[in-house]
Amino acid sequence: MTVSFNHTIVHARNNQASAEFMARIFGLPAPQAMWSFVTVSLDNGVTLDFMEAPGEIAPQHYAFLVSEEEFDQIFLRITAGQVPYWADPARSRAQQINHNDGGRGIYFADPDGHFLEAITRPYGSG
């Protein structure tokens, strides 16, 4: 039996704006409307389905494995957009990247406070 992750729902105050932020920073295709969602497609068939939610948004953490070249482009978009970033999830190393497992990693928040991470090496691979 093969089990594959297919999609998750990401709560947002403005699903269009949050989906566009995600797509822009990660260099992904433009988000698409689907029912009450705005969907961002990832390369492996997984979708992030942004849904508007009333009230407080409970921040979640989403980590993405990217190539070294993709990391360079993501980092350029983060810095060009003046998006605050950190080398660690505790947000104690501001405006730095990490070199965990022999790769590079960065943490930053989306418009709703979800904590996003881009890494070039899987955890424990170094």
Image (cartoon, rainbow, N blue to C red):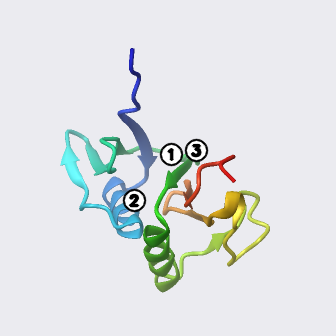
Q: Position of residue 13 (x, y in %)?
A: 43, 53
Q: Residue at x 44, y 45 (%)?
A: 11
- Secondary structure category for the residue under label 2: helix
Q: Nearer the viewer, residue 15 or 94?
A: 94
Instruction: Look at mark 1 in the image and give the residue it sits on.
Output: 55
Q: Amino acid at mark 3?
A: Ala
Residue reaching furthest to the bottom: 80
Residue for point 34% across, 50% down = 42
Classify residue 42 as left or right of residue 82: left
Q: Earlier in the sequence, mark 2 or mark 1?
A: 2
Mark 1 neighbour density, 10 Å: few (under 14) some (14–19) many (20 or more):
few
**Separation of marks 2 and 1 at Cα, in angstroms:** 16 Å
Quarter of the figure that contains the C terminus? bottom right
Say which quarter of the image contains residue 70: bottom left
Disc 1/disc 3 C-alpha distance (Å): 10 Å
Q: CA distance from mark 2 to mark 3?
A: 14 Å
